[in-house]
Image: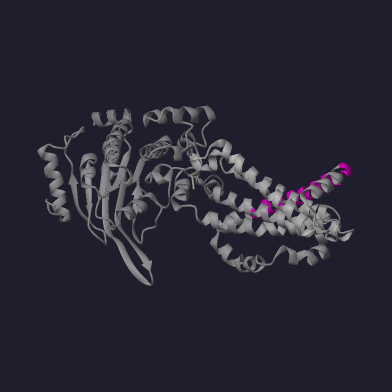
Amino acid sequence: MTPASRIHPVERWLWPILATAVFLLLWHYAVLWSGTRIFPSPREVELGLSQLTHRGVLYRDIVDSLRRVAIGYLAAVGAGIPLGLLLGWYPAAEQTVNPAIQLLRPISPIAWIPVAILFFGVGDDAAIFLVFLGAFFPIVITCVDAVSNVPLIYRRAGSNFGLTAPQVLARVVFPAALPQILVGLRIALGIGWLVVVAGEMIAVNSGLGYLIIDSRNSGKRYDLVVGAMLLIGIIGLALDAVFRRLESIKPVRWGFRHES
Amino acid sequence: MIRASADSFTGDAMPRASAAGKLRVENLGVAFQREGATLPVLDDVNLSVRDGEFVCLLGPSGCGKSTLLNAMAGFLQPTSGQVLVDGEVVRGPDPRRIFVFQERGVFPWLTVAGNIGFGLGKLSREERAKRVQHYVQMVGLQGFEKSYPHELSGGMKQRVEVARALAVNPDVLFLDEPFGALDSITRMVMRSELLRIWEAERKTILFVTHDIDEAVQLADRVVVISARPGRIQQIVDVDLQHPRDISSPRYLKLRDGILSQIGLAHRI
C-alpha cells in the first residue's frame, strides 16, 4: 500500500471512479446472465428514475425526506446538546437520569413506530418524531462523555480568570468538548437518515422510504426500488461529507487527527 | 517621622506591606482520603512571602509542593490552617492570583490573541486589543497572533500561557513546573525570559520545581520541602544579583548546600 500522502491527486479520483464502473458492469452482466425478469439492470434503474424526475415525483420525495430529517435532527440537536452539557456538568443529575436513558437508548426507533402513529397519527410529525428519537440519545450521550473528558486544568483556568459557572460552561467546557460533540452529531445525522427511510415506509405517504415500499406494492417496480435505495446511499454520503468538512474548521481542528 | 510621611505621600507603602507579607501560609495541613485511609500530604507549613518576591518551592516528586501551590491558589481547601493574601483568607481562585500550568493550560480552540485576551472580557474591544498586543510583544510572539496552539512549539505555548496570565495584571503568579515539559535549551531561554518579565512587572511569583539549578538560578528564596508528608525543611536565601553567574563559587556553594540538604550525593 502506498501511504496516503504519496497518492497522486488524479489517482484519488481515478480509482474510485474505476471501481464504481466495474461494480456497475458486474451488476449489468449479472442481471443479463442470470436471466432474471424481476431484478433491474443499472440501465433500467436509470430509466425508471428519469421517468420519476420528469413527473416531479422524485424531487418531491427527496425534499420530503430531507425536510423530515432536518426538523427531527435539529430538534434533537437543540434539546440534546444543552441536556448533555448539563448532565455532564452535574454528575449527580447524570446519575439520576442515566438509568432511564440507558433503558430507552437500545430501543430501535423502528420499535417506536406504533407509538409514534398513536401520538401523532399517520403523517409528517410521526416520521419527524422517529428521526428525533434516533438522533437524540447519541447526541446526549456523547455530550455527557465529552464534558467529562474536558481536562480539569481548562476548568480551573476558566474559574481562575473570574468566570462564573455558566460562563465556564459556555466559554471553556463547550468549546473544549466541541470536537467530540461534532463526532456525536455526525453519527446522529447518519442514524437520522437511516430512521427516516424506515419511518416513511409505514407512517407517511411520501419520501424516499415511501417510494421504495410504494414501488414494490404497486406493480413490483423494482427498478424504482433499487433507484430509491441508491439515492438514499448517495444523499447519506453527501450529508456525511458536509459534516466531515466541519471537522477542519480552525476552532475544532485541534481535536481531530489530520494528515498535515 | 517626616520621612515616614514623605514615604506615604509618594505612595510607597512597601515596607509596611512587606512586614505583614503579601502572602502568608499559616499552619497549613492537607490530607487526602484514599480508600478509607487518611493520607497526610502537607503538615504544618508556615511561610511568608514578600510583595514582589520570587520564591521557588523545591522538593522531590510527590512531596506535596504542587498541592501547596494549589492550596495557595484556592483550588484546594486545606484540611487545617489557612492561606492569607493581603491579610485576607483565600477561599477560592481569584483573577488577582493567576495559576500558570505547564503549557497544557493553553486553550486549543482559541488563537494566540484569543488566549491572551481570554481574561479581559470586561475591557472594551480597543483596550483589549491594545493590552493583547502589549503582551504578545512582551513574550516575543509577534506574527503569531492568529495562530492556533497546535501550530506552535511547546516553548511558544508556554509563552502564550504566561502572557495570558500577565494580561489580567495579577499581583501573584503561581507557576507549577512551567518549563518541565520543555527541552533543556528552551528551558534555559524561558528562565531568562521569565526573569526579564519579572524585573519589568515585579509580580510576586511562587514557582514549583524539582530542578535544583532552576530554583537557584531564579529565586530570591528557595523553600526546600521534605518528602511526604511535606514539611518545610529549610529556606535558603539566594543572595546573588541577577544576571547570575552559574559557575561562580557562591552559586555552586548554594546549589551544593541544597543538594546535601535533600540528601543527595555530589557524584553520580
Residue B215 location in percent, x, y?
23, 44
The quadrant holding residue B226 is: bottom left
Magenta residues (range): A54-80
Residue B183 location in percent, x, y?
30, 42
Name the residue at 82% across, 63% down.
A117
Q: Count up the numbered dots.
A: 0
Judge left or right: residue B27 versus residue A180. left
Judge left or right: residue B118 versus residue A87. left
Q: As rendered, which of A200 and A116 lies closer to the eye?
A: A200
Q: As rendered, which of A42 and B228 lies closer to the eye?
A: A42
Q: Is residue A73 magenta?
A: yes
Name the residue at 32% across, 33% down.
B197
Q: Is residue A120 visible?
A: yes
Name the residue at 39% across, 56% down.
B76
Q: Is residue A126 visible?
A: no
Residue at the limit of the structure toward the left, as seen here: B249
Q: State whether the magenta stretch is mostly helix, strand or loop.
A: helix
